């Protein structure tokens, strides 16, 4: 009896075309097709090369395919990729220890069983509600806290909630510390940090009076790279302590060196009661997220805040390597030095391109306001600049999913001074050609 023959594979005439495949995406992807990445550069299938000024949506702390990350993945994958987070593993234990060493003062407990930044932020809110017994959450205008139903409700932009009829109650949005366009029409020199003081009024008159947490990004990510004025976060921590509210820093974008320090908490000298993290901890794009808490905030049962792929062994091994690299002598100093140089170069560009307004940031978390001739926010032109960045070999992103007027400049943290100058030169050419 003859052995069965394998079914013939697809012939070229049977193969789907690229256009056929694109038809099956839920929404159409960008026509660019990525092939490989190295350092700060992404290469297309056609051999084109782009300097990624947005770090792959702000995930690539160490750039594309960092060789030590690649080797770590190979070695760990040969041993263990995933195991139920009920069990310990060498990689997860090492990461918990490393995070405890670098955590802001007072944050001694590590929770890794989150699958995304949205998930980590929800876990922090659940912990706050559990420990305070209070239901309400305060967040900032323009804040971006995630994509889940609860987190779009907590985020501070109406367009993110508009398509959905079901809203989650108990969220109070308050003005962010956006000094360039101050909600209260104040000047920083004389305002007395009214944006903090008036939160008391929101608590007394717009909430139930029972607030569990204030949650915010120390520097807004998607909301326009708003950097708080000196004293803002300290005053906010004092208000929370006075009223028995837990302060949560969402450091999913600001954490792990982005601001030139391990956390933005270190940059501003303020420790929260909880801190959420994600994105950059994955080094070259490995998905991982979690939170740091004070000792007193333990006790919420794991089944309330654990996710299937949380505490992934492979991702944890990469995170350990990422932290090791960030902590090496000179790494964070380079972020601060290169970031300051980029800010200076962008200031020079602003003197030649009048549509550039405020330039703000810390480290390599930088934003440029793009305005019209009257100084008003110009979102369409901002989107135009980002879209044409690829014509000049740049990958750029804008604020508020294209509804904002801030062009974000957040390259991988391994960027050299020479690469920084190349990026700024390309921006100069983009701006010159854009009008």
Image (cartoon, grey):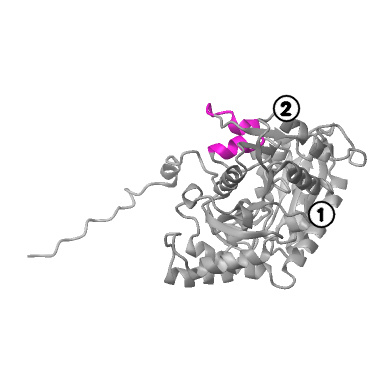
Image location (x, y in percent) of residue 292: 62, 56
Image location (x, y in percent) of residue 421: 77, 60
Q: Quadrant of residue 264?
A: bottom right
Q: Secondary structure at mark 1?
A: helix
Image location (x, y in percent) of residue 15: 35, 49
Identify the residue position indicated by label 1 in the image: 343
Residue that appears at 81% across and 45% down: 235
**Left or right: 213 as drawn, with respect to 377:** left
Q: Quadrant of the N terminus?
A: bottom left
Image location (x, y in percent) of residue 130: 57, 44
Q: Which residues are magenta?
A: 149-166
Asked whether residue 345 is in view, the answer is: yes
Badge 2 density bin: few <14, some 14–19, many ≥20, Cα 10 Å: few
**Viewer-nearest of labels 1 and 2?**
2
Identify the residue position indicated by label 2 in the image: 205
Q: Quadrant of residue 342?
A: bottom right
53 vs 78: above or below = above
Residue that appears at 65% across and 53% down: 275
The answer to which of 131 and 16 lies nearer the viewer is 131
Q: Secondary structure at mark 2?
A: helix
């Amino acid at each position: 009896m003859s052995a069965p023959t394998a079914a013939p594979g697809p012939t070229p005439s049977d193969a789907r075309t690229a256009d056929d495949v694109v038809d099956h995406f839920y929404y159409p992807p960008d026509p660019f097709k990525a092939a490989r990445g190295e350092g700060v550069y992404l290469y297309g299938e056609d051999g084109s090369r782009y300097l990624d000024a947005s770090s792959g949506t702000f995930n690539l702390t160490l750039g594309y395919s960092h060789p030590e990350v690649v080797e770590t993945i190979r070695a760990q994958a040969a041993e263990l990729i995933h195991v139920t987070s009920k069990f310990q593993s060498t990689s997860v234990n090492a990461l918990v220890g490393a995070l405890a060493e670098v955590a802001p003062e007072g944050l001694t407990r590590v929770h890794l069983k989150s699958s995304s930044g949205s998930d980590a932020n929800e876990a922090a809110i659940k912990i706050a509600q559990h420990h305070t017994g209070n239901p309400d959450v305060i967040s900032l205008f323009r804040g971006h806290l995630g994509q889940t139903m609860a987190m779009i409700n907590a985020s501070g932009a109406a367009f993110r909630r508009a398509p959905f009829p079901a809203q989650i109650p108990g969220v109070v949005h308050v003005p962010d510390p956006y000094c360039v366009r101050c909600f209260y029409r104040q000047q920083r020199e004389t305002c007395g940090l009214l944006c903090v003081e008036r939160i008391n009024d929101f608590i007394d008159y717009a909430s139930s009076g029972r607030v569990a947490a204030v949650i915010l990004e120390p520097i807004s990510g998607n909301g326009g790279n708003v950097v708080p004025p000196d004293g803002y976060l300290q005053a906010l921590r004092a208000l929370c302590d006075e009223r028995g509210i837990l302060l949560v820093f969402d450091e999913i974008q600001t954490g792990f060196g982005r601001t030139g320090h391990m956390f933005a908490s270190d940059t501003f000298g303020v420790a929260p009661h909880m801190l959420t993290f994600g994105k950059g901890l994955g080094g070259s794009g490995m998905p991982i997220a979690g939170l740091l808490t004070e000792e007193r905030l333990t006790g919420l049962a794991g089944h309330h805040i654990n996710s299937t792929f949380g505490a992934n062994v492979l991702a944890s091994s990469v995170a350990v390597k990422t932290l090791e690299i960030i902590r090496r002598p000179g790494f964070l100093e380079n972020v601060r030095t290169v970031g300051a140089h980029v800010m200076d170069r962008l200031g020079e560009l602003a003197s030649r391109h009048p549509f550039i307004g405020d330039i703000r940031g810390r480290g390599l978390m930088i934003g440029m306001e793009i305005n019209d001739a009257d100084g008003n926010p110009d979102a369409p032109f901002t989107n135009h600049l980002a879209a044409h960045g690829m014509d000049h070999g740049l990958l750029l992103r804008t604020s508020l999913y294209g509804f904002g007027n801030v062009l974000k400049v957040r390259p991988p943290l391994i960027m050299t001074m020479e690469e920084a100058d190349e990026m700024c030169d390309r921006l100069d050419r983009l701006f010159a050609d854009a009008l």
